[in-house]
């Protein structure tokens, strides 16, 4: 049964396209009011407009503390409260450790880690005011088992996993739940340049023999925001079609090095 999200106000980062846009679309369909944020203002405005009056867009550098303050202020001014945050914004960079650079990990930490930290910190006062709420941090299968040629990326996603567990322990007393979602290989604009094979081709590294789609992830995000998950916090939800990607050296052969 689809979760009823009527009355909930949700912020979704990285929502101009890909996974974030799919999350925002489903949340609106299920009754939520959604604030989409992204650095891509043109696409973000277009995506929000297509979702109707229950969605707005705010241009957002997720690594900026000042921008987070603006997002929180705009959300409350527009919809009156905040009930949930989906820390979805992220970037992917795959390269061998020996040929990588400090710039790689600095950028990944800024977008994949700092943004999650700032987002949780920024939204907590509003969630307390609302009497509780839900934070969903999008990590990765790489944050569960690691991946070859992705030391910096895997490290950033392990950090998201760790921050989620610590925040869940700290914020539970306020009725604030914090969970992480760990997608496997999902066909999004972020991964489009990495996948060698067409997205509709067989994907033998997943038992379900296909690459996932954003619509495979969005219902789980909606569930973790809904009142049907009120005793779930500090959890790690892996959505990967029963994949061996994290353990398999074959994965490198199926992906370009970027």
Image: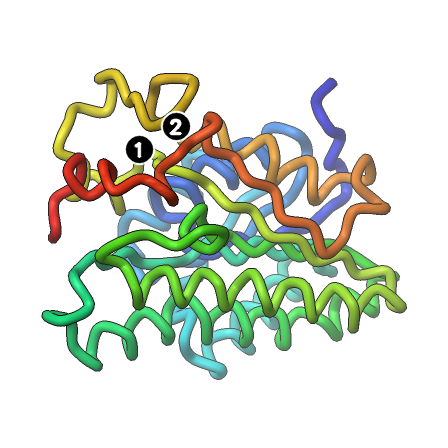
Q: Residues within 10 Å of mark 1 (few under 14, many from 20)?
A: some
Q: Is residue 158 left or right of residue 38?
A: right
In this view, the residue in front, 144 or 84, is 144
Above or below, 143 relative to 250: below
Q: Residues within 10 Å of mark 2 (few under 14, many from 20)?
A: many
Above or below, 5 relative to 96: above
The label on residue 187 is: 1
Q: How is the image coloured?
A: rainbow
In this view, the residue in front, 172 or 166, is 166
Q: Dot 2: what SS?
A: loop
Dividing the picture into quarters, in which one does residue 49 lie? top left
Residue at position x 63%, y 76% from top? Answer: 121
Q: Position of residue 255 (x, y in %)?
A: 17, 40
Above or below, 166 relative to 32: below
Q: Is residue 236 left or right of residue 124?
A: left
Question: CB of mark 1 within 8 Å of CB of mark 2?
Answer: yes
Where is mark 2, residue-wise? 212
Q: Dot 1: what SS?
A: loop
Q: Is residue 154 left or right of residue 94?
A: right
Q: Position of residue 75 (x, y in %)?
A: 61, 62
Q: Is residue 55 left or right of residue 194?
A: right
Residue at position x 55%, y 74% from top? Answer: 117
Residue at position x 52%, y 58% from top? Answer: 87
């Amino acid at each position: 049964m689809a979760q009823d999200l009527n009355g909930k106000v949700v912020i979704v980062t990285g929502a101009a396209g890909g996974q974030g846009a799919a999350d925002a679309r489903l949340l609106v369909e299920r009754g939520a009011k959604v604030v989409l944020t992204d650095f891509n203002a043109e696409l973000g405005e277009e995506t929000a407009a297509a979702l109707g009056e229950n969605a707005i867009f705010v241009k957002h550098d997720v690594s900026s503390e000042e921008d987070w303050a603006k997002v929180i202020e705009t959300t409350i001014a527009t919809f009156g409260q905040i009930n949930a945050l989906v820390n979805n914004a992220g970037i992917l960079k795959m390269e061998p450790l020996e040929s990588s650079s400090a710039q790689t990990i600095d950028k990944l930490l800024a977008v994949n880690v700092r943004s999650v930290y700032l987002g949780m910190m920024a939204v907590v006062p509003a969630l307390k005011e609302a009497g509780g709420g839900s934070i969903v941090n999008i990590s990765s299968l790489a944050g569960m088992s690691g991946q070859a040629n992705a030391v910096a990326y895997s490290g950033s996603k392990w950090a998201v996993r760790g921050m989620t567990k610590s925040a869940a322990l700290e914020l539970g007393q306020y009725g604030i739940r914090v969970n992480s979602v760990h997608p496997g290989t999902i066909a999004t604009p972020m991964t489009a340049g990495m996948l060698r094979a067409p997205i509709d081709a067989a994907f033998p590294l997943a038992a379900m023999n296909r690459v996932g789609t954003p619509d495979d992830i969005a219902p789980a995000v909606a569930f973790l925001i809904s009142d049907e998950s009120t005793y779930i916090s500090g959890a790690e939800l892996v959505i990967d079609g029963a994949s061996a990607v994290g353990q398999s050296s074959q994965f490198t052969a199926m992906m370009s090095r970027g």
